[in-house]
Image: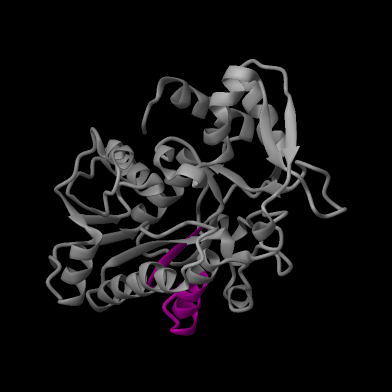
């Protein structure tokens, strides 16, 4: 039996779809459904039961969770990079993950959890996913800090040989429709690009980066799912791993790929970044993928243009994964 937390969210619901595709249907889905848009992520999925995240946590804390659970895939978290409620991040991201990990360790069950590239902060220390680097990282926002705190617990407790942590970089694709302002730029910009042939991107506030030339490691959800499946299929491979493409691309590249996908000539407008973001903004991220490759992951990652073109087919038709 599997558990997928955040199972009605973006990555979690896609993990559910990928597990179903591999023949796995004996799954407990955990989340908190607070809007109809999120519920659509579960339509057509096969699973045993749905539990609210608070009810599920009580089962874990009270030691009442079914011992038949073999694999716990923890994708549930608040991923807002602008929320300023430190206590909420502490409870919802760090403490919740800690309870689940301790249960999995005590019962010798597979535990795969989502970390984030937000842990790398301004990138001054690079993007290697080795333990020595993890111990030094300084995230720029509360979301990154909450993910970093749990990664630190894993490394300092020497549990990296018993758990699998996945540092997702800029994941985008179907099923993120409910995320509002936290949707990818592709999802947010598609309607206007398709209708008017225009897109808006943040201006740069650093002289070494032209407007729109800030770079990110954009990874398509379908590629990210293959990495998750790799860890499901290889339960003895553990540690904290980057999940990106290893190839940084600019926001301008992303915009041009979107224009190409909708067959429009590029018109890019640059606008002021909110003041509260200016000192917390990552200008460059690029996953070092050597560790994952060294552990046997062989599949290639899609080119940005191909990923955006595929995503547009979902956006155009309002489809889910």
203 or 256, which lies in front?
203
- Magenta stretch, residue numbers: 148-167
Q: How is the image coloured?
A: one colour
Rendered residue at 63%/67% (across/down): 140
User: Looking at the picture, does residue 158 appear above or below residue 22?
Assistant: below
Q: Is residue 272 left or right of residue 289?
A: right
Rendered residue at 64%/15% (across/down): 263
User: Is 165 covered by the magenta stretch?
Assistant: yes
User: Looking at the picture, does residue 69 appear above or below residue 175?
Assistant: below
Rendered residue at 62%/58% (across/down): 290
One can see residue 300 in this view: no
One can see residue 133 in this view: yes
Q: Is residue 30 left or right of residue 141?
A: left
Q: Position of residue 229 (x, y in %)?
A: 38, 49
Q: Quadrant of the N terminus?
A: bottom left
User: Is 161 covered by the magenta stretch?
Assistant: yes
Q: Position of residue 74 (x, y in %)?
A: 34, 60
User: Looking at the picture, does residue 229 appear above or below residue 105?
Assistant: above
Q: Is residue 117 left or right of residue 75?
A: right
Q: Position of residue 12 (x, y in %)?
A: 35, 49
Q: Position of residue 64 (x, y in %)?
A: 12, 72
Q: How many marks?
A: 0
194 or 94, which lies in front?
194
Q: Residue furthest top?
A: 263
Q: Quadrant of the C terminus?
A: top left
Q: Residue furthest bottom?
A: 157
Name the quadrant containing residue 304: top right
Name the quadrant containing residue 226: top left
Rendered residue at 25%/78% (across/down): 106
């Amino acid at each position: 039996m599997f558990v997928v937390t955040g199972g009605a969210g973006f990555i979690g619901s896609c993990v559910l779809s990928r597990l179903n595709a591999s023949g796995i249907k004996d799954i407990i889905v955990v989340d908190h459904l607070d809007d109809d848009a999120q519920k659509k992520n579960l339509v057509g999925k096969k699973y045993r039961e749905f539990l609210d995240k608070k009810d599920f946590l009580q089962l874990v804390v009270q030691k009442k969770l079914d011992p038949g659970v073999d694999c716990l895939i923890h994708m549930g978290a608040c991923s807002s990079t602008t929320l300023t409620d430190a206590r909420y991040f502490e409870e919802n991201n760090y403490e919740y993950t800690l309870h689940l990990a301790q249960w999995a360790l005590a019962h010798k069950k597979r535990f795969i959890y989502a970390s984030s590239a937000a842990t790398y902060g301004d990138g001054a220390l690079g993007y290697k996913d080795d333990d020595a680097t993890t111990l030094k990282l300084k995230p720029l926002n509360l979301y990154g800090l909450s993910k970093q705190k749990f990664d630190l617990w894993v490394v300092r407790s020497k549990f990296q040989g018993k758990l699998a942590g996945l540092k997702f970089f800029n994941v985008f694709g179907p099923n993120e429709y409910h995320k509002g302002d936290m949707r990818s730029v592709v999802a947010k910009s598609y309607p206007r690009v398709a209708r008017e042939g225009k897109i808006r991107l943040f201006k740069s506030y650093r002289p070494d980066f032209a407007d729109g030339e800030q770079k990110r490691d954009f990874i398509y959800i379908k590629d990210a799912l293959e990495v998750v499946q790799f860890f499901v299929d290889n339960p003895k491979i553990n540690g904290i791993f980057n999940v990106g493409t290893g190839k940084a691309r600019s926001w301008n590249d992303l915009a041009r790929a979107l224009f190409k996908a909708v067959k429009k000539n590029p018109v890019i407008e640059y606008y002021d970044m909110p003041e509260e973001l200016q000192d917390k903004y990552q200008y460059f991220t690029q996953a070092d993928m050597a560790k994952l490759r060294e552990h046997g992951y062989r599949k290639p990652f899609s080119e940005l243009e191909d990923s955006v073109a595929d995503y547009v087919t979902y956006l155009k038709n309002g489809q889910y994964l």
